[in-house]
Image: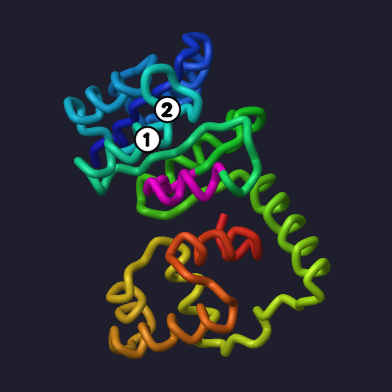
Amino acid sequence: MEPVKVLIADDHGVVRRGLRLQLEQEPSFAVAGEASDGREAVRLAEELKPDVVIMDIAMPNLNGIDAAGQILKKNPRCGVIILSMHSDESYLVRALSAGAKGYLLKDTADVYLVHAVRAVSSGKPFFSPEIAQTLLDDYMVTLKQRGLEDSYELLTDREKEVLQLLASGKSNKDVAAVLGLSPYTVETHRNHLMQKLNLHSATDIVLYAVRKKLIS
């Protein structure tokens, strides 16, 4: 089995070395290259065709989120993991909208890096647990301020299954195959759960699932 090819993009050499050392301890990973700015990351991603790109969010010349968007336009199957100091929702929304599959906080990246690369390389999302807790805390404060309640328990068992599968990166067709349903039925469940939870996009579905800790 071919090792997972990883491109590391960070403007600090010491960070790149640390990430490389950690990844190279895993025989199933191979570091294909390193980039020190966003434009170089885009160029190397096109040249090296990595399976996973680990991308610092604050990159010179081209920021990590915009670089991720460019990489994924050319190679949608590449898994991008964003490294960030920021745990607030606005950065996570931007990263997910660009197509990133993973989001790691820099101060705990060493703990979760290997798990994140494994997950993202197989098409699954991965987020630092602190991200989920921050999003949940903010969400509960917002609900309290508005006098609302979380609507998760209004979902049927089937809608909960569909929600989790969609949030884990599966398409309607994939979900249909897993649950033995037609794509039309899955789309109906998707529309119902989005209405009940007041969600409006695929990004909203992922954010909600992260808050509820339905996905890593």
Q: Quadrant of the C terminus?
A: bottom right
Q: Is residue 5 left or right of residue 128?
A: left
Q: Please check the rendered image and state whether residue 6 is part of the magenta-colored stretch, yes or no.
A: no
- Mark 1 lies on a secondary structure that is helix
In the image, which residues are magenta? 91-102
Which residue is depicted at the point 31% across and 72% down?
174
Furthest toward the top, the residue is 13
Which residue is label 1 attached to? 66
Which residue is label 2 attached to? 63
Closer to us: 137 or 117: 137
Closer to us: 56 or 23: 56
- Sort mark 1 into few (<14), some (14-19) or many (20+) by Cα contacts within 10 Å: some
Which amino acid type is marked by label 2?
Answer: Asn
Q: Please provide percent x and percent y for residue 4.
A: 31, 36
Q: Is residue 79 left or right of residue 2?
A: right
Q: Is residue 21 above or below residue 7?
A: above
- Mark 2 lies on a secondary structure that is loop
Q: Please provide percent x and percent y for residue 106.
A: 60, 29
Which amino acid type is marked by label 1?
Answer: Asp
Q: Are marks 1 and 2 in contact (CB under 8 Å)?
A: yes
Q: Please check the rendered image and state whether residue 92 is part of the magenta-colored stretch, yes or no.
A: yes
Residue 28 can be seen, yes or no: no
